[in-house]
Image (tube, rainbow, N blue to C red):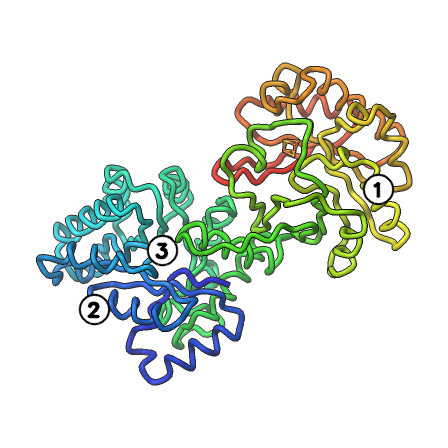
Amino acid sequence: MIDSHAHLDFSQYDLDREEVIREDFENGIEAVVNIGVDLETSRKSIELAEKYTHIYATVGIHPHDSGNAPKDYLAQLEKLASHKKVVAIGEIGLDYYRDHSPRDIQRKAFEQQLELALELDMPVVIHIREAIEDSFKILEKSGVRNGVLHSFPGDEIEARKALEMGFFISFAGPITYPRSSRVDVAASLPLSRIVVETDAPYLTPQAFRGKRNRPSYVRYVIGKLAEIFEPYTFEDMERITSHNARRLFGLPFEKLPQIVYKIRHSLYINLTNRCSSNCYFCPRSGSTDGFVSGHYLFLRKEPSVKEVLEAVERESGFDEVVFCGLGEPTIRLKEMLEIAENLKIKGHKIRLNTNGHGSLINKIDLPLRLLGKVDRVSVSLNAQDADTYVEICKPDRGRESFNAMIEFVKGCKKTGIETVVSVVDLPEIDLEACRKLASDLGVNLRIRRYTEDNRRIVA
Ligand code: SF4
């Protein structure tokens, strides 16, 4: 778990700071971003970051403190920001609820620090309270497009606007309070843009409300998100929010290619990164980082049958095994069938997620070969007609690939394998026409959400 926003330098920890940090790192915390709110706390944050490998610091002047900032505060912040453990400018923003500093001074300090972040090419940590309209105006004008809105106070429309500007949205303890409006806001967001925090010592989750907060309590926020995004599990939300925090703050990534990986209650097999399509939304394409839902899927070499079976053996707590990964599994048909046969003997349920080109690639009647080895097939339909398909998926064999995919769906249906088709809700796709096509084929249609920022849709 990564707590993306805490104030461990505050006096509430003066008596037991070391103990809290040690215990929380022993209790599942991977990293903490300690947030500066003025020059003194920015320096203290850096001191903590120097002392603990997995604590990082931010430097900034909070709107409450903007009225007291010295004249040369920007030069001082710039100097502090050059420290190698400083990962963002913040906490900056506007607070019209408490109005501890005059509003014009708050706005000026916010604008100036955004300018500094832009110059230094650093993300920002933004505090907004009762000042969304002015904050968004300033943010839009600033050109800063990298950062996080801490303990997001807005509604769904405002959250959407923040996403469009490029920001992450952070949730803290208040999302765990009874009837919290933040639940609906979170549910409306793509998982790839959510981070979690404690704001410790403040904003303690419901389970300990009224007591001092601490980084390990971020698990209650993660737990709430897992409830909201069910069937995603706590482990999914933990991994995804940690990955998001690493992307946001540029923290070190461990890039260990996953042969098998769990999402929700399924175990996925990453057999190959090769594919007979080049869908523009695919995480394989372009400049993506190779992560899908927090799992790193760029293989250094394709795994052998033995390696896959051993990797599956090591896992537990899943309902089905899915051939999927970052590539088209039927490109390695021989290995895929051998693995499926072995897993079937052990009583596993098997699903194949495919682009439907398997018969064309292998020059065989694939549905017949799948019989008895695969229980369910999910085919990426991805378009209502061949022209749109070619435009979106750029398959190796053009329109022929679309026709082969349709024939594959018909073949699976005919052999009695449970078959669904899926589309991603891209603007080019006519969902009604896809519904009709699926119904003509006699199969169910699954519509998947497209989020451009992380291209997390995989066939
Ligand atoms: S989305 Fe699936 S079918 Fe499309 S290129 Fe990626 S792996 Fe291949």
Q: Is residue 303 left or right of residue 348?
A: left
Q: Position of residue 340 (x, y in %)?
A: 84, 45
Gap in Å between the C-alphas at discs 2 and 3? 21 Å
Please state which amino acid type lies under the numbered disc 2: Glu
Which residue sits at x=38%, y=76%?
212
Q: Quadrant of residue 457?
A: top right
Which element carries disc 1, helix, strand or loop? loop
Q: First in sequence, mark 1 or 3: give its number.
A: 3
**Camera-nearest residue between 221 and 70:** 70
407 vs 211: above or below:
above
Foreground pick, 83 / 326 = 83
In the picture, measured across the screen, residue 357 lies left or right of residue 167, that is right
Left or right placement of residue 288 versus residue 35 in this view: right
- Where is residue 187? Give x, y as percent: 51, 48
| Some atom of ligand 1 lies within 8 Å of the CB belonging to the residue at label 3 | no
Q: Is residue 56 left or right of residue 96?
A: right
Q: Are marks 1 and 3 in contact (CB under 8 Å)?
A: no
Q: Nearer the viewer, mark 1 or mark 2?
A: 2
Question: Would you name the residue on which mark 1 appears?
Answer: 375
Assess disc 2: are there few (<14), some (14-19) or many (≥20) residues with their C-alpha within 10 Å of its C-alpha. few
Which one is nearer the viewer's eye here, 309 or 411? Answer: 309
Q: Measuring 57% from the left and 48% from the top, which residue is drawn there?
A: 293
Q: CA distance from mark 1 to mark 2?
A: 62 Å
| Distance from the alpha carbon under mark 1 to that under mark 3 | 45 Å
Image region (quadrant) for ligand 1? top right
Mark 1 is surrounded, within 10 Å at the Cα level, by few (under 14), some (14 to 19) or many (20 or more) other residues, namely some
Image quadrant where residue 401 sits:
top right
Q: Mark 1 is on which residue type?
A: Asp
Residue that label 3 marks: 150
